[in-house]
Amino acid sequence: MSFEGMDVEQLQGLAKQIDADAQALDKLVISLTGVVGTLTLLWNGPAAAAFEQDWQAKNRPALLAAYDILTTLHTHLVNNISQQISASAAEGGWTVGRVVADVREGWDKWQDIDGRWVSPIQIPVGLIHDLSGKHYSPGTEAYEEYSKAWNKLIQLDHDGSFLKYHESSVLRYVHDASFVQKADKILVDTHIADFLGPVGMILAAPDAIVNTGEAIVDVKDHHYNSAIQHLGNVAEDEGGVVGLLAGGTTRLLADDYELGKQIQWGQVPNPFSGNNWQADWVPSLEAVPMETFDTVKDAFLE
Amino acid sequence: MAMEGMDLEAVSPVISTLGNAVNELETLIGSTTQAYHTIEGSWTGPDANQFHSQWPSFTTALNQAHNDLSQLHQHLQSNYTAQQSASNQY
């Protein structure tokens, strides 16, 4: 089965509408059954009997059949959405624009869920804006300082195993997300985008690794509330860019888990598959020299 | 069709409920028809063929139910009005 010329959003909208129609029809049948029952008590005679007979033998079964047809269509649509998503992932149908929109939407939801998260998120964005706008420009002392910081990072981590995660599709998508775009100037000028990508910033503190890892495991198991709690720990304990990016990454996956697990990870172990997160990602991240964390923190967070 | 003795006070809310149900059915017919037209041209395959073949019976069922309930609603309403007028003459 396929829907030609329709995207997932259209299908999801249709599925919601048809489900709502089916539920409305179901309620209507229940309501009308009650009305007919009441009428039989208030209305006597052959006309009343004929109507009740029609309702029981004809109208009610027809409406229930209509309900069945609508629910069947809804099931078809939901199944087709899953197939469409699989096909899009297999064909590399994810676009940067699409994922950026997803991240933005997820970000807005996140902020709506719990206001206390807004502050630790807004602070680092403001910080980076400040760095990139007011104080960070070639020739200034700050520029020299950060250039040195990133040169040091390159020296420290050139052979680090975590660099392979730079090739992760998810991290590339997050890199293009709106909230990271806000830090575009400093990312570009310091070459962090080319070298580390967002993962470098996610790794800015060891505790963040643990909490982010737990959150991703929770997402894998669909325990989204627990995942959010773990990310809350990241944001509260580490604050700054760490919480921002770690939260954004996992929130994206939580909102679009079904999409996220179908990402083509290439040579990178899929963190949603088997025990890859615990067996591969965490050891690789933990192997990053501690000095790396300090360098990133010195450059961005302090 | 004749109404034989009607408890006006008791029938009044039933008439309202029935009227609301008729209106809701109209909304549902419009909504489902719109949804069907949206997917009609783009959905292909065996499932689609099966669904397309079922759709006429679905719309027939909804429209028939709507017509029957509309007639009942009108019948009840006119009998209610007639009986109310008769009661007022005494």
Image (tube, rainbow, N blue to C red):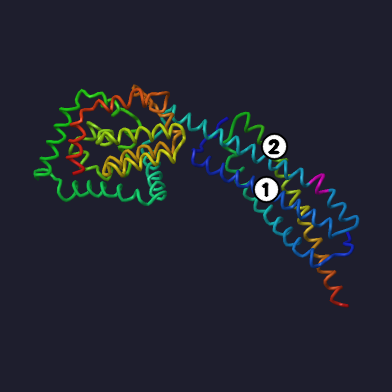
Q: Do callouts 1 and 2 mark residues in contact (Cβ within 8 Å)?
A: no
Front of the two marks 1 and 2 = 1
In this rendering, do the residues under marks 1 and 2 share a single chain? no
Q: Position of residue A192 (x, y in %)?
A: 21, 35
| A72 relative to A156, above or below | below
Q: Quadrant of residue B2?
A: bottom right
> Does residue B77 appear left or right of residue B26 in this picture?
right
Amino acid carrying mark 2 in the image: Gln
Q: Quadrant of residue A99?
A: top left
Amino acid carrying mark 1 in the image: Leu
> Which residue: 51% across, 37% down?
A5
**Towards the viewer: A248 or A230:** A230
The chain containing the residue under callout 1 comes to A
Is residue A14 located in the magenta-colored stretch of the structure? no
Image disc number at residue A245: none
Within 10 angstroms of label 2, few (less than 14), some, or many (20 or more) residues?
A: few
Predominant secondary structure, magenta span: helix
Disc 1 to disc 2, how far (Cα)?
17 Å
Residue on which disc 1 sits: A25
> Which residue: 22% across, 31% down?
A195
Residue on which disc 2 sits: B54
**Towards the viewer: A104 or A225:** A225
